Amino acid sequence: MAENTQVRQLFQDALSGKIDRREVFKRGVALGLSGSVVGMLALSAMPTGLRRAMAAEEGKPVGNAQPWMLNLHPSFRRVGDAVGIEIEEAPTTNFSFDRFIAEANEQTSTWDFYAGVTPFLEMISLVETGTIEPWSPHLPAGLQEDLAPATVEEGSYNGEFYVWPLLLDINVMMWNSGILQKAGLDTTTAPATWDDQIAAAQQVVDSGAAPYGIVFDVRDWRSLIPVTHSISTDVYDPETGLFQYTSEAAVQALEILKRMMPLTIPDVLNPTPVNTTVSPDEQAFAAEQVGYYFKYQNAGFQFSANWPDPSLIGLGALPKTPDGVGGTVFWDTGAVLLTHGANKAKAVEYMQTISADEQMWRDSITGNPDEGTVPVGQLPVLQSLWAQWETSPPDFIAANPWTKSVFESLGNASAIAPTPLAVLQFDTARTEWIKYLSGEEPDARVAMQKAQDAARAVYDQNVTTTATPTA
């Protein structure tokens, strides 16, 4: 804990200009930080004038993206080369945006845009610090309307469109067809209701086809909230955007998760940091120890890639309750336009090009052995592109009919409402509601009331005034 505090203090001192580069290197090395992180902090510690001299120049466009995005999608740099924009690896550590905000405070920016924002986690803080500006004034006529409406709503705040949707992830039900076949279960379609799903998971275990019937990622937005959305999506406070843990749908969702506990892995409730490399659920699916798995679809593709037969992965819509709305959770990892970037038009050109680039989506859906990438299943959100594929489907779409069904599920999916708390809301509440899953708290409603009270308390502690969320 002391070391984490020292690292945080080093970041604050470097980004505020309190220490010089020599001190940054001295303290960074002593704390064991990587060379890339120390180098980024040293750059931040440069005199303001020198940093401004290195800022993005008109005619020399520079964008950046999260390292994982560049690793999974080499097309980011390929498209950049094609349109004349350099794509760099983003200088973020543990999802910190201090560097971008510090530059915005000085009315400068080293980059023109940044790819790696999940709206419900980071959008509000970037808007309210003046770090990013809306895309809308810079877009060609009709382009915003071509984006799937749900994704535009997700990336909007106070009526302005800030996060250009790029990598679409939707929470779905996935399965190992080899295990299901051994258990005598349908390998072509997901169970329609949660009752059916739990019965199927029980059959996996009872048949001996696998040690575990079903697994999930315990983080709120990957477990409790998707199940809640399958019942109702009207579960957010209209004033604060906070998830309503005491809503009937959320309580019912928690009870559904409780029924899965005897059928899932022992460490399913273990704390899982946002920046972890591999979580317990992913390990279980990769090791073919479980029949069913619900999470966003790219997790299933990544962690089935090393199976003896990766084609055995199956995908379908989340189950629902008999009277549920059949919704789910989606999010886009998108791009934001940095306020003080110098090449707005070029940033738009890049984003428009990569959004429609067929090679980008071919590689995402099928992988590219020549570049060492595996399928991740992230999908485009341009409606015109899907209309084109409907009329004349390329081979990689025709061979993967799940792509159409997953994209069409956006019609029932709902984004998580953004709040200034970002992930803090969920990390705080989860300490209470998982007590029902662990058996520490016998009453689901009591657990959820405590979760809601905890989330509201941390909101009141951290948020003084805020505009009404729009997602």
Image (spheres, rainbow, N blue to C red):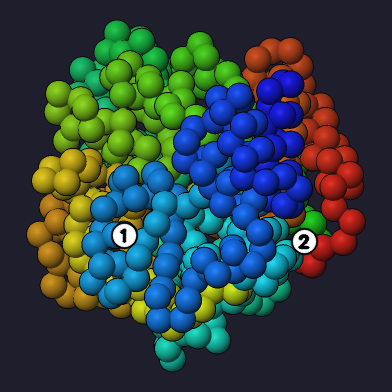
CA–CA distance in space, label 2 to label 1:
37 Å
In percent of width and height, residue 109 lies at 57, 67
Front residue of 140 and 260: 140
On the image, the x and y values in percent for residue 384 come to 30, 77
Q: Nearer the viewer, residue 105 or 450?
A: 105
Q: Give the residue drawn at x 66%, y 77%.
A: 159
Relative to residue 280, is residue 396 drawn left or right?
Answer: left
* Residue drawn at (47%, 17%) of the image: 264
User: Which x, y percent locates residue 464?
Assistant: 89, 56
Q: Name the element at disc 1.
A: helix
Q: In the rendered structure, which amino acid carries the disc numbered 1?
A: Phe
Of badges 2 and 1, the one in the foreground is 1
Question: Which residue lies at the image location 23% right of the left edge and 32% below the top edge?
Answer: 305
User: Compared with residue 95, is residue 310 higher up or lower down, i.e. above or below?
Assistant: above
Mark 1 is surrounded, within 10 Å at the Cα level, by few (under 14), some (14 to 19) or many (20 or more) other residues, namely many
Compare marks 2 and 1 and give the one earlier in the sequence: 1
Q: In this view, does 223 lie to the left or right of 12?
A: left
Report the front residue among 158 and 111. 111
Looking at the image, residue 251 sits to the left or right of residue 356; the answer is: right
Above or below, 270 against 363 in this view is above
**Helix, strand or loop at mark 2:** loop
Q: Position of residue 39 (x, y in %)?
A: 51, 44
Q: Which residue is disc 2 drawn over?
A: 238
Q: Quadrant of residue 469?
A: bottom right
| Residue located 85% across and 37% down the image | 453
Q: In this view, does 223 lie to the left or right of 240?
A: left
Amino acid type shown at disc 2: Pro
In the rendered image, is residue 119 in sight?
Answer: yes
Neighbor class of circle 2 (other Cα within 10 Å; few <14, some 14-19, many 20+) is: some
Given the current orientation, which residue lies at the most extreme bottom position? 141
Quarter holding the N terminus? top right
Residue labelled with disc 1: 76
